[in-house]
Image (cartoon, rainbow, N blue to C red):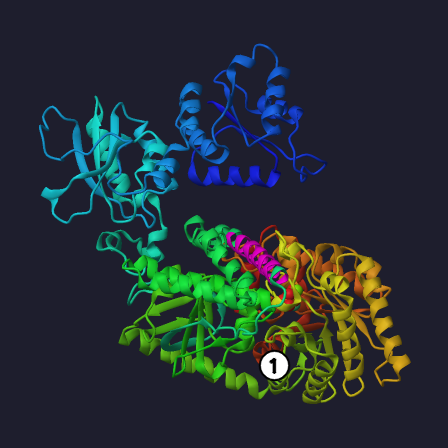
Amino acid sequence: MVGLVLVSHSRNLADALVALIKQVNAATIPIAKAAGVGDDRQEFGTDAMEIVEAIHSVYSSDGVLVLMDLGSAILSAEMALELLPEEMQPHVRLCSAPFIEGAISAAVQIGIGSDLDTVHQEARQALFPKIDQLEHDSATSTSALPGEKPLTGDTAAAPQQIILTILTRHGLHARPAAKLVQMVKTFDAEVEIATFLPSDAEEELRIAKGPVPAASLNRLASLGVVHGDRILVSAQGSMAEQALEAIRRLVAENFGEKDDEFESEPSPEFQRKSPETDVILTGKPSTAIPVSEGIAIGPAFHYHKARIEIPEQGNSDPQTEWTSLQQAMAVVRNNIMQRRRQVQSSLGESRAAIFDAHLFMLEDDSLLTRVRQQIFEQHRNAAAAWKSEMNKAADSYRAAPNPYLHQRAADVEDVEMQVLSVLLGKTTTAFLTFPEPGILIAEELTPTAIAQLDRSKILGIVTVIGGPTSHSAILARALGLPAITGVAPSVVDIPEGTPLAIDGFQGKLWKKPDADVLDELRARQTEWQTTRERLLASSHEPALTRDEHRVKIAANTGNELDAVMAVRNGAEAIGIFRTEFLYLTRNNAPTEGEQVETLTRVGAIMEGRPIYVRTLDVGGDKAIPYLHLPVEANPFLGVRSLRFSFKRPEIFLTQLRAILRAGVQADLRIMLPMISQLEDLLQAKRYVEQAHQALEQAGIPHRWPLEAAMMVETPSAALLTAAFARHLDYFSIGTNDLTQYTLAAERGNPELTSYHDGLDPAVLQLIHKVVQDAHRFGKKVGVCGELAGEPAAVPILVGLGVDELSMNPGSIPRVKDLIRKLEFSAASRLAQNALQAERVSGVRSMAEQFLSTM
Ligand code: PEP
Ligand code: MG
């Protein structure tokens, strides 16, 4: 196979080009990059020696094609050629093709096994389609191509022909065209494609463009085939018939493109082809991931984001306005790319490709030129200028005759809001237009979105994206709302008001459930509610095992309502108070005074029970626009949580002072999240001391000393428990993050639910170590991840010697009831067996077996 070398001044450009090639070209081809200079290759430039190495890495006797961007890249490539051994030089070709177009064309040819000459030739022609489209852009302007000809004629002498309709969402765009080229090459046949002028009548069909060889990606692209176009496929040669049949099948299968499932008005042909497993069918339950128990029955309604109010004042400094807009767009671009990566890994490429349309909107030069004019010539502020041009773009989509284009108006508005949100540092607030309580449907609900919801309107939640330990799922459980996630993406197309039912125990969704299903679900709903009431009646008693081992039961909370629920359900403490929820639903950080007030109110609700106030844990899946978190490739591994607090000491110190001050009237303690090194703890404690000193000097009353505790959420923290134990009295194991980091499986990714199971023996061994080491120093250990409220996990955690379980308030009555049925000695034996297990499935079956004998 011919090798391909990409020489660019920019490493990022080369990386992105390789990614693009992989998108277009399914085949794996030998490809190497020589791009950027400097230690990490992040500086612009090219290096002849790196090019030599790259050529060697993909070299074979089939040869190597080298593509360069510009200027000194060409000089470096020429120098590299001279540095190669003489016998290699004739097989290495420097190609004058445009870098991006050439690379894609070359890759497709390499993928189908073409020789170096063909690959080279095809790459050099890569600019023709663009020239043709931009310089002769008219449906009938075919002068540069073989001319117009009637369809009728002497078919006996002519090649065999078929007419096909292209139904891919974006027509014969790069990916389907590449598949067509690859397929055609496998037959001994000359295949050509032409397009027709628009006409409904078969007998009036006239060629508009083409015919062009189907084996040329560039020539195919020059046809500009869009959704709904009919094409004429002609084939000659010994395998003409087979080639036509294969192409007919490829088109019938929609080129394997899945994205057309999301068309607002799919064509009848497509509806027939939709895979049953990926759509929500009437009557039959669709399977999903259960994230919050309970049964909900009610009409569907959709989540909409509210609009942001725009300041209308003009601007006195156009350059500054323009620069801030550019910066906001850069942040949004990065967010979208990050989101795209997440969706690609969780839901696949076809779903992720939706975000490409969002990215293109940020790169629309003509729109940006008009925005710029508004800022510089009409002196409008950046937000107003951006909004007005984006609104015009959305309106023009709405006015278009094609329903696919109508949908793009929503995309425009989405991108518009994202940019405005960053530009103005404002959070969009949700609004729900549905008049009666129903089941909320959303592609994804961020913690912010859930926190803003009007709970009285929601019976249950259905999302496409999310995982059982995502913060949205935690919130749903805290609200006692049945919820499921990982539902087929077509759920967002269900019309508002459609009757739905969800089973949050098993992860099921019914669209228009029939009477029998409804009867059964209603019966289960009643049983669920009755059991809840029974358990609640005894939930104020302590949790003592039958052999009198005491386990403290606490609640995880994020606001006053949770605290009310905690007390009502029998919590003895607040194990963690997630302070980030005080920040999520606003447009600016809460002041010290506001935080003192909230914490004081929570303290009053808890009536003297201890409250571990966890310091700000933002980042990961909790973004707060106005805090301008850094844009990172892996936010869960980045400047998250305490690391963010260290970067923004003013925010951290404000929060610490508020906790110390509110501690005067409540038993508040500090809980430090995401500690991974001893230095994190020591540094955080220095900030606590600094906050105390500041209050002391100002003569402001506050609680001092105040107990500091840490969360164990990283494997490193678990392994170093003994080192930390000298510096604090209490550890709280955050199993949500500990599982995510131990198993390297992002907690919100529904594709990875089999990995983020806190009962994995690896996680249990870490918990065991924390308990053992902490107890050696006489320190207590709690668990505050979702595992603590999970019935299957409770006997094991208790058996491991965990002193306190902190959970969402709704789980408290059931867990207390369960502990009362336990023998501590039996739980300890179970835990020891679980520690010996090799697989999580082994642990789960032991736990089930144990529960069934209770
Ligand atoms: C955890 O990680 O288990 C935890 C309790 O913290 P959070 O879920 O808020 O990240
Ligand atoms: Mg955590």
Q: Residue 227's x, y, as percent?
A: 29, 49
Q: Which residues are magenta?
A: 320-340
The answer to whether residue 421 is left or right of residue 664 is: left
Task: Assign a secondary structure to mark 1.
Answer: helix
Q: Residue 45's x, y, as percent?
A: 65, 33
Residue 295 vertical placement versus 385 (above, below): below
Work out whether residue 851 can be spotted: no
Q: Residue 294's x, y, as percent?
A: 46, 75
Residue at the image point whose x is 37% and y is 33% from the top: 218
Q: Is residue 325 magenta?
A: yes
How many marks can you see?
1
Residue at the image point whose x is 84% and y is 63% from the top: 682
Residue at the image point whose x is 44% and y is 72% from the top: 303
Residue 458 vertical placement versus 683 (above, below): below
The C terminus: image quadrant: bottom right
**Toward which corner of the image does residue 559 lie, by quadrant?**
bottom right
Residue 74 vertical placement versus 775 (above, below): above
Which amino acid type is shown beneath numbered disc 1?
Answer: Asp
Q: Residue 262's x, y, as percent?
A: 35, 57
Q: Is residue 817 magenta?
A: no
User: For mark 1, what is the residue?
Assistant: 562
- In the displayed orientation, state which residue is furthest to the front: 377
Crowding around mark 1 (Cα neighbors within 10 Å: few <14, some 14 to 19, many 20+) is many
